[in-house]
Amino acid sequence: MVETEQFIMGDVACAEGAIASGCRFFAGYPITPATEIAERMAKRLPQVGGTYIQMEDEMASMAAILGASWGGLKSMTSTSGPGFSLMMENIGLGIIMEVPCVVVNVQRAGPSTGLPTLCAQGDVMQARWGSHGHYEIIALSASSPQELFDVTIKAFNLSERYRIPVLVLTDEVVGHMTEKVIIQPSDRIEIYSRKISNLSPQEYLPYLPDEDMVAPMVGVGEGYNIHSTGLTHDERGYPVITAAVQKEMMDRLIYKIRNNVDNILEYEEIETADAEMILIAYGISARPALKALEMAREKGVKCGMLKLITIWPFPEKKIKELASQVKGFIVPEINYGQVYLEVERCVAGKAKTVLISHAGGSIFHPDKILEVITKL
Amino acid sequence: MKKQGLKELDGMPGKHPLSALLREDRMPHIWCPGCDIGTIFSSCLTAIHESKKDYNSFALISGIGCSGRAAGYVKLDSFHTTHGRAIPFATGLKIAKPKMKIIVFSGDGDIFTIGGNHFIHAARRNMDLTVICVNNFTYGMTGGQVASSTPFNAKTSTTPEGNFETPFNLSYIAAAAGAVYVSRWTTLHIRRLTSSILEAFNKKGFSFVEVVSSCPTSFGRKNKLGTPLHIIQHFHKISVIRNGIHPKDANLDIGKEIVVGKFVDIERPTFFDLRQDIYPVEKEEEV
């Protein structure tokens, strides 16, 4: 098998990444600028024996992918801001039930209807904290159609590995831009599928974790009589309304991610070795940031960049490490400071931290970022 | 973990006749003394038993509320989801497991008030599900607030002087939205209810069984309906069986008349039939 080159839109690349990951169920609701993902899935899924279903709203879409994932299908939905808000409660259900699935948010400017057709990066903190209660989450970002293809595959693998909904955060510009995407043949794409228990129904407990803190799953309809609930539950999956069981369950939900941060994290370091200042950027903003870096280097300014692929969990260790090496960090993002707050927290006064904010509706011009670099 | 109830049951002369379908290690249940949900739950389990199908071919999905706790007591693959979203969850599971019989068991507030939109769309799609709705006219778990099924003028904790809104006719909604099987019974009609649930299971497509029931603790006390026995006697007095009538004419007035019966039993291609016509895939056998 050989790799193919396609000239496709980011949203389409995302859908193709899902198909390549083995996604066979998509439930969605039309919303700009994520609609093209649904449209592509509607076309592609029947070709591979999967199902596309257009639900009545995003609450239903999210609930349906949880049901389908329990039924054994790798499942996905995609949306943008308003729909993402509607999905939040059932994302929480996915977290507590520990259901592998992928939720793509092609961000647009908000609040509310905002700028439906124009980009923003305002949902970074919503991705982290949007559902109620305390939890850990995995969110990945992409700054090109190629990356969107790649991180969608990574999102499926992580969701299956850690039994958690994985969020893909991209934005209108990446979703709608058309670029070359190299699609590797299926035998060269690494796919991880959920652990399936080989215990008998008498021995199996649905929430008894292995050493890696993740419990193996079993199929529905196979005599295991599994019970799963959004209530706090013990290893049998049975509700237990006590502080002690809450702690036991929460510790596992939190630490199955925290203890594996190094396995989950992905970022790119660009010219950081001798850097005196570092740009921290993700999604579409990483592209003008890279251009600004190149222009700064031409002027002899020692600028580097940390490009985030994994946004959540946050690369704390890496930023703390860089903080003792550089004079300052510059965070360009299309919001009024979200990743910036995390950077500031990690840097903890050891270096200067500068936010370049943007209200949304367009992307950064490299000159604007360069201006800040040269002033620092 | 202490397994409550199991030891006591083991010491008794006989097991519960439905013990194979019960999570006995979860007993005692949370339902109040006199609550009707247990009756409906038993009817549902009896119908599963009488279907003669492999128990493993059933799964039960609930939303939130007193009735939603059914998923935690049935010894089947069972999922207790979010408020109002049992039907879309069940839709996803059914598509992944088309050979299984997926039951949605939940209350009126869950299925019709917060989750009403999902109900009408699943009926429109003729999604192959059986929805059993415990209609006790109120939000029992939170202490008896007004719901979209609360009778006009009934007292609830949020309509202390009486409900001034008009309730839904659940069976009429189901029929109008496209359900192929619609029936309504009260918790007095246990045998008819059980055979109706069994008929619903055997139906291809979206089947709906509404069960008029009492919540003596919340709704009953506020409306001075008397003891649980009084309420059942009242159901006996005012229920009229009228099979085959149009559900829009199936009156549900707990002061005067409760029309029960099988209102709809029709054939219509299901979601899976129609999808197969346009997007042919290897057809899976229905159980």
Image (cartoon, coloured by chain):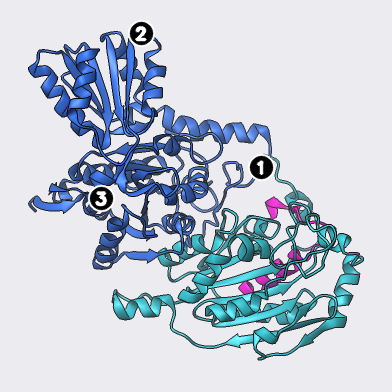
Give the residue pinned by disc 1.
A240
Q: Nearer the viewer, mark 3 or mark 1?
A: 3
The colour chain B appears in is: cyan
Q: Do dots 2 and 1 share one subunit?
A: yes
Chain of the residue that carries numbered disc 2 in the rendered image: A
Q: Residue at x 69, y 60 (%)?
A: B67
Q: Residue at x 64, y 55 (%)?
A: B64
Neighbour tally class for label 3: few under 14, some 14-19, many 20 plus, Cα within 10 Å = many
The residue under label 2 is which amino acid type? Lys
Q: CA distance from mark 2 to mark 3?
A: 38 Å
Q: Residue at x 42, y 56 (%)?
A: A65
Q: Do dots 2 and 3 share one subunit?
A: yes
Give the residue pinned by disc 2.
A350
**Residue A57 is covered by the magenta coloring:** no
Q: CA distance from mark 3 to mark 1?
A: 40 Å
Name the spot of residue B108 as percent of width and height, x first.
67, 65
Q: Residue at x 92, y 66 (%)?
A: B226
Chain of the residue that carries numbered disc 3 in the rendered image: A
**Residue B51 is covered by the magenta coloring:** yes
Residue A244 or A211: which is nearer the viewer? A244
Q: Earlier in the sequence, mark 2 or mark 3?
A: 3
Name the spot of residue B276 as percent of width and height, x first.
33, 78
The residue under label 3 is which amino acid type? Cys
Give the residue pinned by disc 3.
A14
Q: Which chain wears blue? A: A
Name the spot of residue B66 as percent of width and height, x first.
71, 57
The residue under label 1 is which amino acid type? Val
Q: Give the magenta range.
A: B23-52
Q: Earlier in the sequence, mark 2 or mark 1?
A: 1
Q: Earlier in the sequence, mark 3 or mark 1?
A: 3
Is A6 placed above or below B18 here? above
**Residue B55 in view (yes/no):** no
